[in-house]
């Protein structure tokens, strides 16, 4: 099975390589650090390393507190963090206190073995559910225990995995433990072949995340709002392609008023210029965050947040937040950061990547669902007008966050058990078939 998988993966990589090279940006999004993709990682001290793998920005943010705690609890060990995307690497280098940050190797046996030999981990933590068969098999062959932490399987991913469920049983048998976010995630991973006795529901690490304070930006923004006489701010965070037009339509549909500002924060930095052109063509007053010091804020206009790492701090100025990636079929984004500040949240119908969290927020009365731009406009207008409603939703969000915290401590308990058993034989991995 493994050799067949490796052949198909190699063919797929060769097929997409020309496209990625043509699409490569000036910062080398796909070619920079290419050696790391081939397992060429700078060697780390033998023994004592905890390797954490987080795919993209969301997973990287989720493990920020965990990495800090690992360094505090195990000062003699080093923590290595691998990522898959350039955005995650940029974020990790600014916020995550890992000793080493690098790209995860392509899942081919020789490349995986090279990376494992360089890092020489005592324990591997895979955030959410990245099932890489060769990596899991090679880790087990070295006797290195692997834990899936903050495990989640969306409905879309589950449908894809079920097609190859028979092929996943052997790789999943190489995993020492599955720490899943919810009962549904636990049932899904068991159905895919995870040994039931190794599956545990521990909650979601993202509930433990505290947004960065970013005091400098907070001071700058507060002063800019005061100078412009703006008291009512709406934020559309992590918007995706095709979504800005819907957000602007909702903004235009609001009743005329003074002292308002719409903030649009595209999810991906490479789209900043595209969204700027859309705003230029919209006829609305607007400016960029990168020109805030010179231009100031437009009253009853739009601010394009064309920076990285400031969205969470921006949420605290909002009267209401729309979480992007949800009015278009992308799967939504994290609603917990605005909830931390007690800000009412709205999202669209496409929240399949965060379905459990979205359902919990709706049930708690801490969020609204808008299925269209006109519905979003109605929700925004209510939240601008009704202060008691805003306070009620904000308090409901804070209470939900408080009730759901604690996953980090449960993950740390599981890590301690695995490190204590490090000398024991790793979870058995079936022979190559």
Image (cartoon, helix red, strand yellow):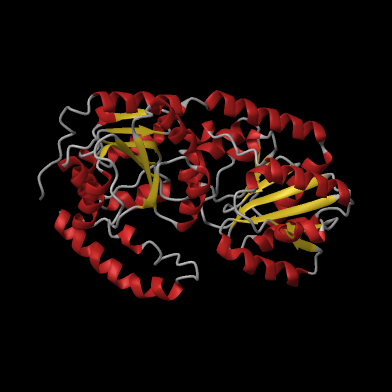
Q: Is 302 situated left or right of 369 in this image? A: right
* Residue placed most toward the observer, 145 or 275: 145
Residue 274 occupies quadrant: bottom right
What is the quadrant of the N terminus in the image? bottom left
Q: Which residue is drawn at 48% across and 25% down?
A: 406
* Vertical comparison of 272 with 124: above or below: below
Q: Is residue 165 visible to us here?
A: no
* Vertical comparison of 173 with 37: above or below: above
Q: Which residue is drawn at 58% across and 25% down?
A: 402
* Residue placed most toward the observer, 366 or 41: 41
Residue 125 occupies quadrant: top left
**Residue 103's spot in the image, x, y percent?**
37, 54
Q: Which residue is drawn at 58% across and 49% down?
A: 349
* Residue placed most toward the observer, 358 or 425: 425
Residue 171 occupies quadrant: top left
* Vertical comparison of 402 with 140: above or below: above
**Residue 185's spot in the image, x, y percent?**
39, 37
Q: Is 371 situated left or right of 85 in this image? A: right
**Residue 84's spot in the image, x, y percent?**
40, 54
Q: Is residue 305 visible to us here?
A: yes
Count of numbered marks: 0
Q: Residue at x 72, y 53 (%)?
A: 263
**Residue 107's spot in the image, x, y percent?**
26, 55
Q: Is 182 situated left or right of 342 in this image? A: left
């Amino acid at each position: 099975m493994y050799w067949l998988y490796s052949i198909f993966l190699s063919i797929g990589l060769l097929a997409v390589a020309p496209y990625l090279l043509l699409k490569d940006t000036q910062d080398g999004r796909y070619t920079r650090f290419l050696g790391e993709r081939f397992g060429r990682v700078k060697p780390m001290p033998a023994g004592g390393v905890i390797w954490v793998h987080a795919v993209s920005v969301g997973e990287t943010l989720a493990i920020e507190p965990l990495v800090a705690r690992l360094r505090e609890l195990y000062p003699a060990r080093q923590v290595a963090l691998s990522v898959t995307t350039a955005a995650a690497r940029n974020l990790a280098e600014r916020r995550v206190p890992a000793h080493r940050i690098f790209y995860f190797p392509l899942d081919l046996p020789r490349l995986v073995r090279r990376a494992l030999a360089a890092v020489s981990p005592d324990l591997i933590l895979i955030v959410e559910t990245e099932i890489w068969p060769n990596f899991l098999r090679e880790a087990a062959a070295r006797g290195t225990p692997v834990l899936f932490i903050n495990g989640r399987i969306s409905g879309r991913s589950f449908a894809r995995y079920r097609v190859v469920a028979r092929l996943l049983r052997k790789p999943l048998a190489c995993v020492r433990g599955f720490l899943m976010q919810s009962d549904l995630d636990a049932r899904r991973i068991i159905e895919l072949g995870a040994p039931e006795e190794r599956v545990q529901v521990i909650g979601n690490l993202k509930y433990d995340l505290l947004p960065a304070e970013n005091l400098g930006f907070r001071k700058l923004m507060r002063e800019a709002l005061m100078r412009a006489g703006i008291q009512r701010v709406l934020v559309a965070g992590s918007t995706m392609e095709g979504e800005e037009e819907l957000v602007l339509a909702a903004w235009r549909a609001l009743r005329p008023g003074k002292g308002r500002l719409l903030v649009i924060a595209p999810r991906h930095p490479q789209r900043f210029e595209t969204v700027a052109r859309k705003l230029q063509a919209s006829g609305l007053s607007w400016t960029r965050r990168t020109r805030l010091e010179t231009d100031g804020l437009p009253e009853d206009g739009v601010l394009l947040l064309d920076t990285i790492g400031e969205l969470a701090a921006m949420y605290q100025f909002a009267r209401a937040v729309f979480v992007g990636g949800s009015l278009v079929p992308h799967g939504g984004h994290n609603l917990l950061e605005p909830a931390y500040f007690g800000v009412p949240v709205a999202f669209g119908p496409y929240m399949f990547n965060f379905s459990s969290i979205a359902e919990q927020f709706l049930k708690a009365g801490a969020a609204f669902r808008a299925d269209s731009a006109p519905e979003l406009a109605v929700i925004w207008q209510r939240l601008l007008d009704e202060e008691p409603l805003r306070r009620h939703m904000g308090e409901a969000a804070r209470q939900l966050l408080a009730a759901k915290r604690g996953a980090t401590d449960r993950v740390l308990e599981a890590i301690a058990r695995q490190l204590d058993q490090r000398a024991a034989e790793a979870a058995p991995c079936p022979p190559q078939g």
